Amino acid sequence: MPELPEVETTRRSIEPTLAGRRIVEVIVGRDRVLRRQPVPELFVPRVKGNTVTAVGRLGKFLDVSLADGISLVIHLGMSGRIEHHPDSEIPHARHTQLVLTTDVGEQLRFVDPRTFGFVAALDEDERHLVFANIGRDAFTDLPTARELREAWGRSRSPMKALLLDQKVVAGIGNIYADEILHRAKVHPLLRGEQLTTRRIATIHAAIHDVLADGLRWGGTSLEDLAYLLPDGRAGQFKERLAVYGKTDEPCDVCGRAIRQITVRQRSTHFCNRCQREPRA
């Protein structure tokens, strides 16, 4: 958290503010946020004075292209969010890790209380290393059902873990993995090697549909409000979650109580009637 819908919602929100703008001031709140920068002293010189040519995303990463070939890569971690402030005089929130001021006086601020996120200004080779183990984007470049079958079909890992593995499909995290498996009626402990062609096709469709729904409602803001849209609004998809965070509540489809288990150290929510337990 934030996952693909939250990061894409953020990207769409900040693109009008950043695209074509020159960054005239850069303030780094804590050195820890630069821990993925190969040479931390290069971060500010690479960003300050540079012009943004595109605001992209891959999986859970914001990937901002600058005019001289540098990529400003931002990962929001577990608790990060981007704030947009048309007025630079507004006081900085606690845990502000980075402030970018554009040539029209607007600011984007990266706020990250738990400091698991990072920013980096990377040349082409450095960017390649950061993204070397990141798979295809789950929304804009989702592998075909056949390609997913080839990637997952021999695996003994459970489906929950396979969806969370960013090496094949990038962008899905704990919330949306639970929602995808419920939508597809697939038990989270079903192993990759147990997948049928029909189940793969169902999971493939559910990935697109659940992520599209998350985007439609601005992502998921939980009770801690760690994720908010850049304008301060909360994402509304929480009200439409089917299983995540709903332990012991009735399933919207069948009425049976939602169960919670741990899969590979990740809390997992599912309906044991809609998502039948796989045979050993």
Image (cartoon, rainbow, N blue to C red):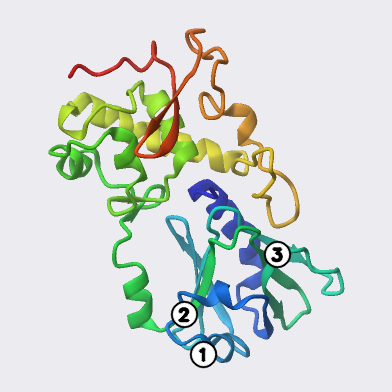
Q: Position of residue 196 (x, y in %)?
A: 17, 26
Q: Which residue is pictured at 60% across the width and 73% down the height?
A: 19
Q: Secondary structure at mark 3?
A: loop
Q: Which numbered disc flags the more N-terminal residue, 3 or 1?
A: 1
Residue corresponding to mark 3: 95
Structural crowding at the residue carrying mark 2, measured as other residues with C-alpha within 10 Å and reported as few (<14), some (14–19) or many (≥20): some
Q: Which residue is pictured at 29% across the width and 34% down the height?
A: 159
The quarter holding residue 124 reads bottom left
Q: Which residue is pictured at 38% across the width and 28% down the height?
A: 181
Q: Is residue 175 above or below residue 93?
A: above
126 or 261: nearer the viewer: 261
Q: Position of residue 248 (x, y in %)?
A: 55, 16
Q: Are marks 3 and 1 in contact (CB under 8 Å)?
A: no
Three-letter amino acid code of the residue under disc 1: Leu
Q: Secondary structure at mark 1?
A: helix
Residue corresponding to mark 1: 42
Q: Secondary structure at mark 2?
A: loop
Residue corresponding to mark 2: 37
Describe residue 212's horizontal placement relative to residue 194 as left or right: right
Q: Are marks 1 and 2 in contact (CB under 8 Å)?
A: yes
> What is the CA distance from the residue labelled 2 to the residue labelled 3?
19 Å
The quarter holding residue 236 reads top right
Three-letter amino acid code of the residue under disc 3: His
Three-letter amino acid code of the residue under disc 2: Gln
